[in-house]
Amino acid sequence: MKMKMKMTSDFYMHNNMVKFKYYNISSKGKETTFKDLTNQILTKSPETPYAASCWWNVKMVKKRYVLKATITLPRIRGPPLKHGVRKQWDTWHKPLKCHELGHLMFGRLYRDTMNEFLKTKPTPTQRKEHERRVHKHLAKEERGFDRKTQHGLLPHKFTKSINHVC
Ligand SMILES: [Zn+2]
């Protein structure tokens, strides 16, 4: 099955079905090290051992497939960090966020593929069968995406279209 990835303006920011949730990592100011910050992730992340997550679900609502998603990410609270530490954090955090947005793209792809299929006026059985096939295909792709990007550590190693999301 071939599926085209497309980026449109409603991709994530304008999609009110996408929620961002944050958990707080505390800074004690200038003496805080990058390790102090990352050490807190294991205990504070609701998705531990992962630092972030993207949960998505596609459902039919009033004859259209609708995407619902929640992205959870860490954020720093407290006095400003030393410049170098802030930079280290940003260098790590940006690809992590990018990775989670990459997951969101799979949800969007699923929604769009199914909405496209609805134009062929399928029977409920054909629709269920197509859902199953598309989901199976995308789940495999998504696992490959996780492997190739090492769950957010190396998003630049995936494809240009994913990098777009950064
Ligand atoms: Zn992942």
Image (tube, helix red, strand yellow):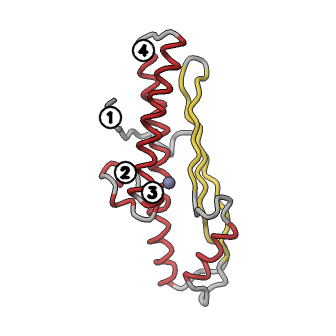
Q: Which mark is residue 162?
A: 2
Name the residue beneath numbered marker 4.
119
Q: Residues within 10 Å of mark 1 (few under 14, many from 20)?
A: few
| Chain-order first, disc 1 or disc 3 | 1
Q: Position of residue 71 (x, y in %)?
A: 58, 51
Q: Residues within 10 Å of mark 4 (few under 14, many from 20)?
A: few
Q: Which mark is residue 98?
A: 3
Q: Work out how far the residue at label 1 is from the one at label 2, CA to CA, in angstroms.
A: 13 Å
Q: Work out how far the residue at label 3 is from the one at label 4, CA to CA, in angstroms.
A: 32 Å
- Callout 4 amino acid: Lys
Asked whether, in this view, residue 134 is left or right of residue 156, the answer is: right
| Chain-order first, disc 3 or disc 2 | 3
Q: Quadrant of the C terminus?
A: bottom left
Q: Quadrant of the N terminus?
A: top left
| Residue plotted at (56% across, 50% down) | 54
Q: Quadrant of residue 142?
A: top left
- Callout 1 amino acid: Lys
Mark 1, secondary structure of its residue: loop
